[in-house]
Amino acid sequence: MTAQMLIIFFSAIFTDNILLARFLGMCSFLAVSRQIKTAVGLGAAVTFVLACTSVLNWFVYHRLLVPFGLEYLRFIAFIIVIAAFVQFVEIVIERFSPVLYYALGIFLPLITVNCAILGVSLFMIIREMGAVMSFFYGAGSGVGWALAIIAMAGIREKMQKARIPKGLEGPGITLIIAGIMALAFLGLAGALTPPQ
Amino acid sequence: MKENFYTVLYMVLIAAGFTGVTSGVHLLNRERIERNREAMRARVVLRALGIEVRRGAGFEEIEQVYRQRVQDTGRTVTIREEEHPILEGLDEQGEPMGYAFEIVGRGVWDAIRGYLAISLELDLILGLAWHEQNETPGLGGEITREWFMAQFRDLPLPDEPGPDGRYVRLVPAGVEPGEHDADAITGATGTSDAVQEIINHALGRFMQAMAESD
Amino acid sequence: MPDMMKKIALSRSWQVFKTGVWNENPIFRQILGICSTLAITNLMVNTVVMSAGLIFVLACSNVTVSLLRNYTPRRIRMIVQTLIIAAYVIVVKILLDAYLPDVSEALGAYVGLIITNCIIMGRAEGFASSNPPWPSLVDGVACGIGYSIILIAITIPRELMGQGTLFHVQLLGEWWRPWTIMVMPPGAFFALALAVWIARRHAEPPAAEQQTGGPPQ
């Protein structure tokens, strides 16, 4: 049980990285990966929201939608849960921790439209995970996403002075680096054997 | 205050309206979706038994073939804590020709599910087909290709599993496959191992179930 | 006939259409909305169905947002738009399940992710919420088509080089050894980067080129 949770967690980070293998959360990845500092803030916020919403949505789906045969409404239900949760967190940390609010709060509105959040909830349903497993999957995906964006920000900071062909400046070169990173992560695929 | 009331009312109306519309579309198509889902599974059972339904066949056609060629034996086999019915495939004269049952296990990315068909004498794998897999396209995903599945058509089964507990093995390139072996997928060790495990685990359980029910 | 063409060319609808397909092409100009679709660009069949679904959702949500634009209270505008988009995505999902079950299975979670596609939200907020229904419809269809063109441009090399096929039809002979990497995730990044590069080199007007000179911000 525990081993399986750990494997889910680590494979969500490395072999099944939500960004590099599933392409989710690309918009903010391309836009907010210029500085390590902001990347860390956004990464932390995404991880937190992912871990919480995946569990919340698990309960919404299995306790509210399935009993009434309303599975087809899950898209609406999930997006509302995510939007409401993000709003709630924003209000809470604004009230209790202005420091944290200035560090993370500004990223929260960006998160509602981050496809990685909705994506994790949808994958969790398709893969028929349990509530605990959903939590580990959500947390792992968040850490994986954060890892990818922080690494990308680090590389881009180093490349500031590099001469890049004009057409590739900005998104173009970022995509190529992401491709190379995806290659590296792909190499880890064999490192985690699936639990039987 | 009045404005707030309007906002709430508007939100409720919009939500009700769109939920109504989507529910309507859902109800209109529910039966079709359900039958599609059943047909997709039926088709995999048939494929495992070596009965091909033409590509692009609608669910009605598949259902018809399925009714004629497959029946439930009433027996079950438990694989990974799931109870699966043992089905029986019939040949064109309506005579029993083999068993089919669902097999399941974890692949590299995700669960792999399929059906395995075994001859009545339990000495041949009649065939294998998948209905759920998310292996890497081009690598592990090759398990759905014809060349891979063809290896399991009429593959002889040993009377007893080998010393490693396996009935069949997936051997890597360069190794000459034995009588009970099939080629693994080059470059997709994870998927090959998973498939080998899924098949052997299921075979073990199935043989046990058959021995008990005799 | 030439008169007719001229008229079309000058009409507002055509302008809106052209802007949507090319001048403001969401992927090249803004690199938006690739997240939810890049993953399925390894097979033509999936890409075409996904594009059709996207165009449908874009057009419908644009028209609906536009029709409701004078009644929607400002404060809850975003949530209403999200609701509208989600409803249409559900409709697409149901129709796919009912009529194209194989493709629906292959697309998996990515159909649902159309909801978070920034382009749809962007067009609803940026165009439809301040324009009448007809131009909004044109805008939605045009943006959808512009988007689809790029997706298809990425898919062709990926499927052709990765598997030697297009629409599952074998095009390259036995001599072609498939580049598996093209159908795997890194292939998508490289294909998109190349597409963006080619488009920017050829399409950027000279004036804009000067502006974009210098290191990226």
Image (tube, grey):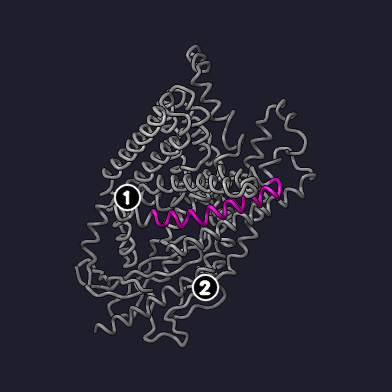
Q: Main secondary structure of the magenta part?
A: helix
In the rendered image of this protein, does residue A52 appear above or below residue B50?
A: above
Specify whether residue C80 is painted magenta. no
User: The residue tagged with tag 1: helix, strand or loop?
Assistant: loop
Report the front residue among B182 and A97.
Answer: A97
Q: Circle 1 sits on which residue?
A: A70
Question: What residue type is disc 1 on?
Answer: Leu
Q: Earlier in the sequence, mark 1 or mark 2?
A: 2
When asked about the image quadrant of residue B204, the answer is bottom left
**Which residue is under mark 2?**
A3
Observer able to see residue B40: yes
Instruction: From this view, report whether residue B188 is shown above or below residue B22.
Output: below
**Residue A102's x, y, as percent?**
64, 45
Above or below — where is B193 with respect to C13? below
In this view of the protein, which residue sits in the foreground, C45 or A35? A35
Which region of the structure is painted magenta? A34-60
